[in-house]
């Protein structure tokens, strides 16, 4: 059940197993976000199996599979909206935690300076400086409205 805290609400992890889900629920997480496409590697648990276990353990589950080099603005919006709706701590997972951290950084830079966001990532062990140009391009854009 290894995970890395990015900020007060979000932790990230490498691929989790079905048996990890109950431990995450016991640790106080309220939402799991899957950022890994099914079938990326042989033997990887399918999102639907983890989602079913999450529901059984009282957790919400969002399936938002992304490819690291092809994260769209819609992916960032969906990730940000899921975080905003979560009633408590969130665990996002992918192969290594990097994609999940990238999604967070791309959303967070709408609210905070690029250097502060990158520093948080670096403290958590994720060097996303290569993402700096995209983060700078996004900086200052307002997040999408969640009114509905």
Image (cartoon, rainbow, N blue to C red):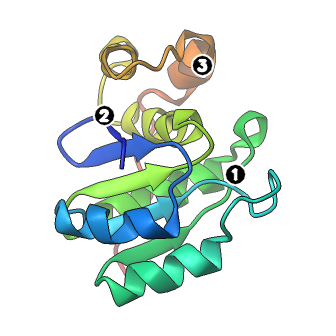
Disc 1 residue crowd, few under 14, some 14–19, many 20+, Cα 10 Å: some
Counting from the top left corner in percent of width and height, residue 103 is at 52, 42
Instruction: State the SS at label 2.
Output: loop
Q: CA distance from mark 3 to mark 1?
A: 16 Å
User: Does 125 sit above or below residue 57?
Assistant: above
- Of the image marks 2 and 3, the number of the one nearer the N terminus: 2
Counting from the top left corner in percent of width and height, residue 94 is at 58, 47
Disc 2 residue crowd, few under 14, some 14–19, many 20+, Cα 10 Å: many
Q: Residue 66, labelled with which disc? A: 1
Q: Nearer the viewer, residue 50 or 60?
A: 50
Q: Residue 6, labelled with which disc? A: 2
- Of the image marks 2 and 1, the number of the one nearer the N terminus: 2
- Residue 87, picture quadrant: bottom left
Instruction: State the SS at label 1.
Output: loop
Q: Residue 34, labelled with which disc? A: none
Which residue in the structure is indicated by mark 3?
131
* Rendered residue at 75%/64% (across/down): 38
Q: CA distance from mark 2 to mark 3?
A: 17 Å
Q: Nearer the viewer, residue 119 or 2?
A: 2
> Relative to residue 51, is residue 71 drawn left or right?
right
* Rendered residue at 30%/34% (across/down): 6
> Relative to residue 109, is residue 27 drawn left or right?
left
Counting from the top left corner in percent of width and height, residue 2 is at 36, 42
- Residue 39, picture quadrant: bottom right
* Rendered residue at 60%/62% (across/down): 64
| 3 or 1: mark nearer the eye | 1
Instruction: State the SS at label 3.
Output: helix
Q: Is residue 145 visible?
A: no
Q: How many marks are shown on the rendered structure?
A: 3
Which quarter of the image is occupied by the C terminus?
bottom left
Mark 2 and mark 1 in contact? Answer it, CB < 8 Å: no
């Amino acid at each position: 059940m290894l995970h890395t805290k990015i900020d007060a609400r979000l932790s990230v992890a490498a691929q989790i197993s079905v048996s990890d889900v109950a431990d995450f629920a016991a640790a106080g997480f309220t939402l799991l976000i899957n950022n890994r496409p099914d079938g990326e590697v042989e033997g990887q648990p399918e999102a639907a199996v983890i989602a079913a276990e999450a529901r059984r353990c009282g957790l919400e589950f969002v399936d938002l599979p992304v490819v690291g080099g092809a994260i769209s603005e819609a992916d960032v919006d969906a990730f940000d909206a899921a975080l905003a709706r979560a009633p408590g701590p969130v665990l996002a997972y992918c192969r290594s935690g990097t994609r999940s951290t990238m999604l967070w950084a791309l959303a967070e830079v709408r609210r905070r300076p690029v250097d502060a966001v990158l520093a948080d990532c670096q403290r958590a062990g994720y060097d996303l400086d290569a993402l700096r140009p995209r983060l700078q391009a996004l900086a200052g854009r307002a997040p999408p409205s969640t009114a509905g």
